[in-house]
Image: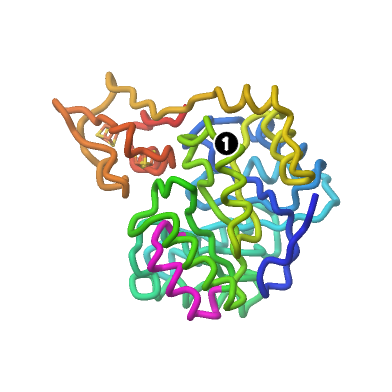
Amino acid sequence: MEKVALGATGLTVSRLVFGTLPMGPLQAGFTPKDGGRLIRSALEAGVTMLDTAELYGTYPHIRAALDGYRGEVTIASKTHAPDGPTARSHVERALRELDRERIDIIHCHAARIADPFVERAGVIEELLTMKGEGKIGHVGLSTHFVAAVRKAANHPEIEVVHPLINQAGMGIIDGSAADMAAAIAACTAAGTGIYAMKALAGGNLIASARQSLRYVMDLPGVHAVALGMLSEAEVAANVSLFSTGETDAALWQELEGQRRHLRIMERFCKGCGLCVPACVNSALALKDGVAVVDKTACVLCGYCAAACPEFIIRVV
Ligand code: SF4
Ligand code: SF4
């Protein structure tokens, strides 16, 4: 598979990045063994970069995938910590659970933070300190905000940005797909490495997957694209698309026929409302004492699942 320089980081990565969120406990709930096997198959097919986060619960899956693996791999994780000490504890946990001496990229996981350079200044400072200690290779920013991507272009200490972009603009909080594309191009011009998230809007654009992926792959300044994959068929289809540009029509038609949705087990909902503010897309509300989802606004990110103390929300 084609490899690209990730901005000025010095890292060279595959254009297809394995996004591990969907296989974890917030979504499909794969066991580490099953998830590890799928990640390993992608690594052996040429994928060299894995994306995870403190929130995703997929460190065991990655560790299983890398057991005995001698190939090249770049790992990006994220901390959603509100302060420096918590961020440090998140990075230490990643190092321990992934059994690494250094995590290649740690993002300030600021999906819903309008200005992480102000609201997460302590986190970014701590991550830079840990970079100085050799525990982090590069500090990054993951965000759904155009303004944050735009601002990152003027912050050379942020070496990698992981922005939300898809052709429908779904999930972008403060602008359109064109606005985000312009902000991405500004970052790349400044030397920032860019790998995109939510090219299929969490599955909402699955019916037009090939066209939607092509839109993000061809965007100026996007070096690589993170995609969640849940089957060998998805791995094979994406590896082929990213390696040769070829698509097996029958296989893709089958994949594009798949549908995912958010499932709230209403019977067990306590009506506490904790999930409602966890959704930056305002897709959740309480109705008659239980949480309900507006499917037209939901991008299937699964973040509300992490906020539910009853563990009754899943993307399936
Ligand atoms: S309802 Fe949940 S899965 Fe859907 S966009 Fe909101 S946080 Fe994400
Ligand atoms: S957080 Fe869970 S229990 Fe609380 S309202 Fe939301 S779905 Fe129901």
Q: Which residues are magenta?
A: 143-158
Is 4 above or below relative to 155? above
Q: Which residue position holds label 1?
A: 209
> How many marks are shown on the rendered structure?
1
Does the beta carbon of the residue at mark 1 sit less than 8 Å from ligand 1?
Answer: no
284 or 184, nearer to the observer: 184
83 or 37, nearer to the observer: 37
**Element carrying mark 1:** helix
Is 180 above or below relative to 278? below
Residue 297, percent from left and from top: 32, 39
Q: Residue at x 49, y 61 (%)?
A: 181
Q: Is residue 260 visible?
A: yes
Q: Is residue 79 left or right of residue 66?
A: left
Outermost residue toward the left in this view: 288
Residue 152, percent from left and from top: 47, 73
Q: Is residue 211 left or right of residue 247?
A: left
- Mark 1 belongs to which amino acid? Ala
Outermost residue toward the top in this view: 267
Q: Is residue 199 left or right of residue 282?
A: right
- The answer to which image quadrant residue 77 occupies is bottom right
Q: Residue at x 62, y 36 (%)?
A: 229
Residue 201, percent from left and from top: 47, 42
Ligand 1 is in which quadrant of the figure? top left
Q: Residue at x 47, y 27 (%)?
A: 260
